[in-house]
Amino acid sequence: MRTLYFTTRTALHELARHKLRSSLTCLGIVIGIAAVIVMTEIGQGTTEAVRQTISTLGANMVQVEPGASSSSGVHWGAGTCLTLSPEDADAIVRECPTVRYAAPGVDCRLQVIYRERNWKPWKVLGTTPEYLIARNWADLEEGNAFTDAEVRTAATVCLMGQTPAKHLFGDESPIGKTIRVGSLLLRVIGVLRPKGTNMMGFDQDDVVIAPWTTVKFRINGSKLAFSDLNAAFNPVNQVNTLSKVYPNQQMPLYPQPSPTQIADTPMLIRFADLDDIYVSVHSAEEIPHAMEQIKQLLRKRHRLRDDQPDDFGVRDMSEASKAFASTTIMMTNLLLGVALIALVVGGVGIMNIMLVSVTERTREIGLRMAVGAKPRHILRQFLTEAVLLCLLGGIVGMLIGHGASVLVTALLKWPTIPSMEAVVASFATCTGVGVVFGYYPAWKASRLDPIVALRYE
């Protein structure tokens, strides 16, 4: 221990004698370690941000969409094959062991009006309470969610996202207020927690959620109106009588309910097509297996032959986020590789300066050997100087790197997370660089002939 203390003190004294040279020598180490620290902290911050974005999509979400229909050789595009039904959603939960929840989805884009204010949200979504659980939206910002009973009765209630609530109500609480969606009045019973934008840039808070039966039968109903019969008995169209310039004068044999009565007490059609089915899987590892189970089940339920293509699509909702996360990790590793190159360059600089130091101190080495110093003592001293030079440069580089990451967060608003693993790895790297690139000059110094060294000018 005493020998180590003496060697360290001698090495520090020698480095202090040439402050400028020592500072310039460890500059490469400073740059390399600073780059490692800042890249690691930015990479971890970005990875955590991507992880949070994936979590806003829900717990391992899978989305089932209608497929593309065709007629007489003309393909009408994705979403035009009206084959998904609420019974499909029930069957997915019942017969797929990897699935936790399955929620039907019906959506549309309509103007939402409150008094003199209006807003057109990105989506008016009709679904069930299970959708809120699957999307991690069960804990509302304010109010309560609608129930399964309200889904069965097509209740005129809804939940509002942060964006439409802000535009329609400002600082006023929307709970208990009545808004108009299309031609239907809905009572706001809850406000969703904020989620922000997803990886595709869409505002997840720009949404109004209601029971799917309400959206399908009382607001939307567009896909059921392809036939003239359904269009004629659509209560929404009958309530809006502004287009009826000449009313029908024929008197029916029996009294008929008024359009308002039909709209207030709808008779639900048991079969209704869905725009989506949102599925929550138990774990991320089971998503591929769950997608295969859903595919096989729906092909069986839709009675598709082996030679027929799927009339639906199944996709992992977090694929884009995971791809972005892998790209971020790849770019971080690339930048870390550049930082390691800077460390190698710094190590070469240290080796060069240590060789110069051996040449300058040849007579000192010979004198120490003449008074009894052994080659291992000379080797230890020069190796300690190289390691201390790297460690000092590493400490300065860590401080600069962490300061740079704080500056990046403050100015560019990029997320960064301090990394203890990066600090430990930096210390280990500095020590390794000092040993690897300092050993040869130290070994060369220890192999000098004392007599030749004393005669060196």
Image (tube, rainbow, N blue to C red):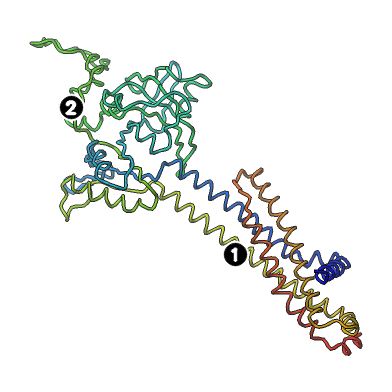
Q: Is residue 399 found left or right of 151 in the rendered image? A: right
Amino acid bearing label 1: Gly
Q: Residue 428, position in %: x, y?
A: 67, 64
On-image quarter of the N terminus: bottom right
State the residue lying farthest toward the left.
253
Labels in figure, total:
2
Q: Quadrant of residue 446?
A: bottom right
Residue 440 falls in which quadrant of the image? bottom right
Name the residue carrying label 1.
Answer: 337
Give the mark toward the camera: 1 or 2: 1
Question: 10 Å neighbourhood of mark 1: few (<14), some, or many (≥20)?
Answer: some
The answer to whether residue 387 is left or right of residue 278 is: right
Give the numbered dot on residue 98. Answer: none
SS at circle 1: helix
Q: Earlier in the sequence, mark 1 or mark 2?
A: 2
Question: What residue is shown at x 61% (from left), y 48% (from top)?
Answer: 416
Q: Is residue 368 left or right of residue 202?
A: right
Q: Which residue is mark 2?
A: 230
List x then y, in percent, for residue 154: 28, 24
- The x and y percentages for residue 32 are 68, 62
Amino acid type assigned to the residue bearing label 2 in the image: Asn
Front-most of residues 412 and 243: 412
Q: Nearer the viewer, residue 387 or 253?
A: 387
Towards the viewer: 33 or 144: 144
In the rendered view, tell whether residue 27 sits above or below residue 363.
above
